[in-house]
Structures are given as structure tokens and as C-alpha cells.
Image (spheres, rainbow, N blue to C red):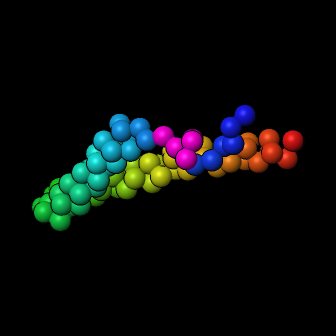
Amino acid sequence: MQEQNFKNHAILVPGFHYIGMLSILALLGGSINYLCRATPENKYLAALLTLAAFIFAVLWIYIRTFPLKAQDRAIRAEENLR
């Protein structure tokens, strides 16, 4: 069996890594711009949109890191079994 390392297990999914990240950055930038330019009557909607953008950004990070940690644990358990 081939040794598992970053070079032979790395995969870049364009829809996730490029389009998704650009979408979140656009949402974050647009919501901050809307928050800065909003009238006092629209501040609630602008703040809600900004909060949603930050939540999506945090979720984006966790969606990527949690499976990697689980995979690392599984690989370590398999190595300890050998």
C-alpha cells in the first residue's frame, strides 16, 4: 500500500475552494459595505446580514477542519494497530 501523505492525498475542489470562498468574501464585503452605508432605519437588516456573513465564514472554516481532524485520528489509529 502506498504511504499516505499530503502529496498523494491533497485534492482541490474548485467549487468549494474557489467559488465558495469568493462567494463568502463577496457576501462579507457587501454586508459590511451595506452596514456602513445603511440609514438608521435599515441598521437592523444590515447588522443581521453582516452577522450572517460572519457565521458563514466561521462555518466555512469548521466544515474543512473537522473532517481533517477525524481523518488524522483514523490514520493514527490505523498506524497504532499495525
User: Chief secondary structure of the magenta span?
Assistant: helix
Question: The magenta stretch spans which residues?
Answer: 7-11
Image check: 19 left or right of 6?
left
Q: Residue furthest right?
A: 81
Residue 44 visible within the image: no
Identify whether 43 is placed above or below 26: below
Residue at image position (85%, 47%) is 80
Residue 17 visible within the image: yes
State the quadrant of the N terminus: top right
Task: Report x, y in % for residue 69.
Answer: 64, 49
Q: Report the label total.
A: 0
For residue 75: magenta? no
The quarter of the picture where residue 39 lies is: bottom left
State the quadrant of the C terminus: top right
Residue situated in front as seen by the camera: 29 or 82: 82
Task: Report x, y in % for residue 61.
Answer: 47, 52
Residue at image position (57%, 42%) is 8
Q: Residue furthest bottom?
A: 36
Image check: 33 left or right of 13?
left
Residue situated in front as seen by the camera: 75 or 64: 75
Residue situated in front as seen by the camera: 53 or 77: 77
Residue at image position (44%, 48%) is 60
Residue situated in front as seen by the camera: 74 or 29: 74
Task: Report x, y in % for residue 28.
Answer: 28, 55
Image check: 40 left or right of 53?
left
Task: Report x, y in % for residue 37.
Answer: 13, 63
Identify whether 34 is placed above or below 78: below
For residue 10: magenta? yes
Image check: 37 left or right of 62?
left
The quarter of the picture where residue 74 lies is: top right
Q: Residue furthest top?
A: 1
Residue at image position (58%, 48%) is 6
